[in-house]
Structure formats: C-alpha cells, structure tokens
Amino acid sequence: MVSPEFSHPQSSSPMAKTRNRSFWCLPDGCLVLGSAFLSLLLVWSFWSFFTPTQNFQSPVTEPSLKSKSSEDCSESGFGVNLKSDPKDRTFYDDPEMSYSIEKPVKDWDEKRQEWLKYHPSFAAGARERIVLVTGSQPKPCKNPIGDHLLLRFFKNKVDYCRIHGYDIFYNNLLLHPKMGSFWAKLPVVKAAMLAHPEAEWIWWVDSDALFTDMEFKLPLERYKNHNLVVHGWPKLIYDSKSWTSLNAGVFLIRNCQWSMDLIKTWSSMGPISKDHEKWGEIQRSTFKDKLFPDSDDQSALIYLLYTEKEKYYDHIYLEGEFYLEGYWVEIIGGYENTTERYLEIERGAPKLRRRHAEKVSEQYAVFREEFLKEAGNGRGSWRRPLITHFTGCQPCSGDYNQMYAGESCWEGMVKALNFADNQVLRKYGFMHPDLHDSSTVTEVPFDYPADEGPW
Ligand SMILES: [Mn+2]
C-alpha cells in the first residue's frame, strides 16, 4: 500500500511538556507514584551498578558498594531479582482473575502497581521495559519451506531482542478456540500483559514480519502520552476510509487498564462475538476497499478510530514517520543501495568500523545516527527499514496474494532475512556475501570495509 509521509499532528501536543507523567495509562488514568516508592527507586539507582550503564564508571569490585548490594542481588539476573516473590497477595492470588479474553480485567493499573511495589528490582526500569510477543499456528506448515522460514523469522526477532535486552514470548497455540487467524494475537497479548506486570509495553510483531534494522530502537519518549502505537495515517482513516490506513500486524501496546478495555472492545468485533458476521458487513460497507467478507482485527481497529475519534484518537499514536512496519514490495529493492550507503559511511568513520562485543551494539547505533541525518525515513529513504512486513505472503500456508508471483514472496523473504542476518553475523565475524544465498558465508576482514577484499 501507499505510505504517505507527513508529520504526526499529535507530536506537538501540549501534553508533551510534562516529562514524567506517564507511568500508567495515559492521559486518563495517570497515577502519581508515592514518595515511598520513589525513594525505593532512588535506592535502586544506587544498587543498580550490577547493570553497568554508559555513564557508570565505578568498578564493580569496589568493596564499599559490594557488601550491601551483593546480599540483595547475588541471586539476581541483570539487575533484577529473579528469585524473590514475597508472600504478599497480588492479583495472581485472586481466584477471580482470569487470563481468558472473555473475562475482562478490572483495576489493572492498581494491580500492576501493587505487584511492582512488592518487586522493587523490576519497578526501577519498568517504564522502558518491553516484551516482544509473536507466534504462529499450532500445526506444521503446509508450505514445505514454511517451518524453516518461520524459524528464521523467529531467529531474527530473538536476535533483535538479545541486542536490545528485551524479553520475547513465542506463542504457537490458539488461546481461544474461536480466535484464530488474525484474531489470535489479541488473547495472546492480553495473557502476556498479565504474565509480564514488569513490562510497560507489549510489542506484537507478526510472524511474517522481520527486523531489518537491528540497531534502531523505538522512540518511546514520543509515545509517552499514548497507549497504542501502530503504523498508520490519519488521512487514510478519515478521508479515504481505507482498510489499509493502518497495519495491525505490528503494534506496541501499553500494559495498562486502557489497553485491557481496548482489547475487550476490539475483540468484541471478532469471532467470539455473536455479532461477528454483522461486523464483517459493517466493515465492508464502511471501508470500500475491503474485499473479503469476514470481520478482521485491522478493520475493527480502524473502525473504532473512525467512529469514535474523540474516544480513541488521542490515545493511539499513528506512527507514519518510519517503518514501524513496511510493505515488503516497496522495500526489498532498496536493500543493496542501503548496504552500499552504510558501507560508504563506515569507510569514512573508523569508529564505526571498530570490532566490538554484540552487547555494546547500541553504542555503535548512537555513533551511526549522526551519519544518518540525510538518510530520511520511510518511503524513499536509504535508512534501513525497522521492520519489513511480508503482507500478502503467508510463509506457513504458502498462500499468497495473486497480485504477486509466489516466488517473489519467498525470494523476498530470503533476501530480507539475509540482509538482517548480516547485521547480526558481523558481530560474530561473518557475513552473507550474497543476499540471495542463505547458506554461504564469508569471514569479515579486519577493519572492514576499509580493507574490503576482492569479493
Ligand atoms: Mn502480517
């Protein structure tokens, strides 16, 4: 689909002045943290030397720091305490609390806050914490190379999460028997919100989408006054009334009551509703370019934005500035040019060529950023697209939209997967010399690409 670019009208909202307001659902349910909790945060920032940050210079063996912290953190992983679950009652102990999509959760902000109060090591970084959620169907793929492709799409997400320190959950079950196909994500996202009270955001990424910029991080600061972030364009929703005015295959949703309510309303247009068929008809009559009869999650979300703008628009950030997900057809032809432009930058910037541990990759992303100012974003840009989405190609079933040759789907996927893999492999000393050839690798020469060899 077309992806018009214009700046987001909400980005200049007056809300943007208040920096630290948005811990919980925004802007309706903004809860101020108590002073006791804040002091816990302060104490934690002192303890957190176990998680060295870019600014922290003290050696971890400093004896005066070691004694107290090691008692509390000796059984911890990466600055959070994985072994402490105090006996205090939380929502997990409430027999009424259900993970099912059919039983709404109430007072989630308070319940989540209470859990964090009893787990202070998680409270410290909660605002920035993301859990990526993805998944596929329970059965083996019909497409003979389907499972292999899904494995590579999943590996790509694991790579991205490892580089950025995010947790990832892969679901391959229908959590509600009626919520299949594109509706299957909603029960999973709801369950993930309950399973991860430590995370502020759940990031759903479809199985047919992959990260093609392993360095780029979501600009969370931009979303601080919003609860849902999707790739989309207001003009296409309100003027064109198109069912592709946003894409529901990738979204970031805040772990809060507003989102619980949205999921309830959203899924009420899905197959769990007795009005499911009727919703299909309503969607088709509202969005004239929608050609199939069934009610789908993407049209349902656009319908909410379209019919209840006052209720939803201020809470949903339509990200149109970069490829939060991008249509593969308009992207994959640009990988070679992008690769060449990035190499050109590196030839002139030794600090970008320096070999480094994978763990410190984010620092090199910061270095690179100053050279990407001219790259642009989104369509027509030579910046690596954050996510390439193979909309219309189904890796597992092997079905594809008849407007493409099937081969172009599978070849495009291989090219995108290798393009992404090259960014990862380089930290391990290797790369694919040919994006169309998955099985051949070459060793990366020292000081590459300055010493680029004849290959
Ligand atoms: Mn998809």
Image (tube, rainbow, N blue to C red):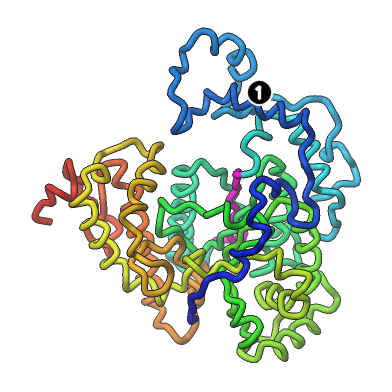
Binning the other alpha carbons within 10 Å of mark 1 as few (below 14), some (14 to 19) or many (20 upward) gives few
Foreground of the two, 100 or 90: 90
Relative to 396, residue 171 above or below: above
Q: Would residue 251 be found to the left or right of residue 191 on screen?
A: left
Q: Residue at x 71, y 49 (%)?
A: 193
Q: Would residue 258 be found to the left or right of residue 447 on screen?
A: right
Can residue 397 be spotted in the picture? no
Relative to 311, residue 236 above or below: below
Image location of residue 115, percent across then percent down? 77, 36
Can residue 432 be spotted in the picture? yes
Relative to 272, residue 168 above or below: above
Q: Residue at x 57, y 52 (%)?
A: 220
Foreground of the two, 455 or 22: 22
Disc 1: which residue: 43
Q: Would residue 332 be found to the left or right of residue 273 on screen?
A: left
Q: Residue at x 79, y 54 (%)?
A: 257
Image location of residue 55, percent across then percent down? 45, 31
Image location of residue 242, percent across then percent down? 61, 85
Q: Spot the residue most to the right.
A: 96
Q: Quadrant of the C terminus?
A: bottom left
Q: Tag 1: residue type?
A: Val
Q: Secondary structure at mark 1?
A: helix
| Residue 139 lies in the magenta-colored region | yes
Q: Spot the residue most to the left.
A: 454
Asked if disc 1 is less than 8 Å from ligand 1, the answer is no
Q: Residue at x 67, y 30 (%)?
A: 41
Image location of residue 356, percent across then percent down? 30, 37
Relative to 226, residue 286 above or below: below
Numbered label tally: 1
Instruction: Place residue 138 in its image quadrant.
Output: bottom right
Q: Which residues are magenta?
A: 128-140
